[in-house]
């Protein structure tokens, strides 16, 4: 699926976009599943273990900004990350041992889809080594108008910025005043539906409000090398190993010299990155009224 030049690009930039990996049939099936999930959210007015709701959500007008851990919600999401095409790319970018760390479906509805402030995934779940990345599956045609993910090339090899607030608690975002030069260099992950983006776990990224009349749904999988163990620990080894996508079970974590700052003390508002970031005094992106 990708060439040696693509691999070199990823290693240099911490970012790669592979056009139209998923075909039209699987995309249509995914959209049907997503539509059913959004419709079912009418049964709740609170965030749940499945739904993170947009401000303004009502049973009459369901608005969902995230489906949590979709690979546990519907088999189709789990099938995609385990598909030969995806495993082939991951093996070239990370190596033969692969583990799924987590998944989420960020949904930006037309005109109001929530932004995500600038951050590094590494700040949320540091591991013993940084052979990790996030896959972004574009479920809709994505361009500059409907809130694409923005990634700054090369930041995966740079510092780990503080994601803590003035109160000393984890805030889930970086003070935008500290990264103006990096923000100015960011590039959008755009393309046709079915395209896949791959960004390194330490790459700086964020995304703006969706101001278009089209949705922008992005299915995300967080991946790590199988010998990368979470610094915050493993509570259930059997469940941990159930997320192996390739390679044998590993009980000897590989340690490398990478910057680590644990996401503690925890934020006062928890539940998702949206809730965590909402408590910050500074923000970069505009928000819906």
Image (cartoon, helix red, strand yellow):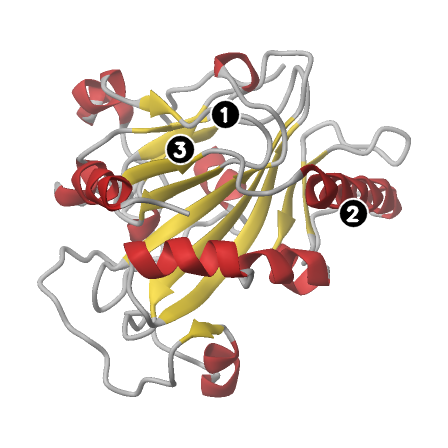
Whether the residues at callouts 2 and 3 have beta carbons within 8 Å, the answer is no
139 lies above or below 191: below
Residue at (63% x, 61% y) in the render: 79
Residue 46, percent from left and from top? 74, 46
Whether the residues at callouts 1 and 2 have beta carbons within 8 Å, the answer is no
Element type at mark 3: loop
Q: Write down the quadrant of residue 216 in the picture.
A: top right
Q: Is residue 271 visible?
A: no
- Residue closest to the far left: 257
Residue corresponding to mark 2: 33
Q: Which dot, 1 or 2, sits closer to the camera?
A: 1
Q: Is residue 281 visible?
A: yes
Element type at mark 1: loop
74 lies above or below 192: below
Quote the CA–CA distance across marks 3 and 1. Answer: 31 Å
Residue at (42% x, 47% y) in the render: 1
| CA neighbours of label 1 inside 10 A, class few (<14), some (14 to 19), many (20+) | many
| CA neighbours of label 2 inside 10 A, class few (<14), some (14 to 19), many (20+) | some
Quote the CA–CA distance across marks 2 and 3. Answer: 34 Å
Residue corresponding to mark 3: 280
Q: Write down the quadrant of residue 41 in the picture.
A: top right
Residue corresponding to mark 1: 191
Whether the residues at callouts 3 and 1 have beta carbons within 8 Å, the answer is no
Q: Which dot, 3 or 1, sits closer to the camera?
A: 1
């Amino acid at each position: 699926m990708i060439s040696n030049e693509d691999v070199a690009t990823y290693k240099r930039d911490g970012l790669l976009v592979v056009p139209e990996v998923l075909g039209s049939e699987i995309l249509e099936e995914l959209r049907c599943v997503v539509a059913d999930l959004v419709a079912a959210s009418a049964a709740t007015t609170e965030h749940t273990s499945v739904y993170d709701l947009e401000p303004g959500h009502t049973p009459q007008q369901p608005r969902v900004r995230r489906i949590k851990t979709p690979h546990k919600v519907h088999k189709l999401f789990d099938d995609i990350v385990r598909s030969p095409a995806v495993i082939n790319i991951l093996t070239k970018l990370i190596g033969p041992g692969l583990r799924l760390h987590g998944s989420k479906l960020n949904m930006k509805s037309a005109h109001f889809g929530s932004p995500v402030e600038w951050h590094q995934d590494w700040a949320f779940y540091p591991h013993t080594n940084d052979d990790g990345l996030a896959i972004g599956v574009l479920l809709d045609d994505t361009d500059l108008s409907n809130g694409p993910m923005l990634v700054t090339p090369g930041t995966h090899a740079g510092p780990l910025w503080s994601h803590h607030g003035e109160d000393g608690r984890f805030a889930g975002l970086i003070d935008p005043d500290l990264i103006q030069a990096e923000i100015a260099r960011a590039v959008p992950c755009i393309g046709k539906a079915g395209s896949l983006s791959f960004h390194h776990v330490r790459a700086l990224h964020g995304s703006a409000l969706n101001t278009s009349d089209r949705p922008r749904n992005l299915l995300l999988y967080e991946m790590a090398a199988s010998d990368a163990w979470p610094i915050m620990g493993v509570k259930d080894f059997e469940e941990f190993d159930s997320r192996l996508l390739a390679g044998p079970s590993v009980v000897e974590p590989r340690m490398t010299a990478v910057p680590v700052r644990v996401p503690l003390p925890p934020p006062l508002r928890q539940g998702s990155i949206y809730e965590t970031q909402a408590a910050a005094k500074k923000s970069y992106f505009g928000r819906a009224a």
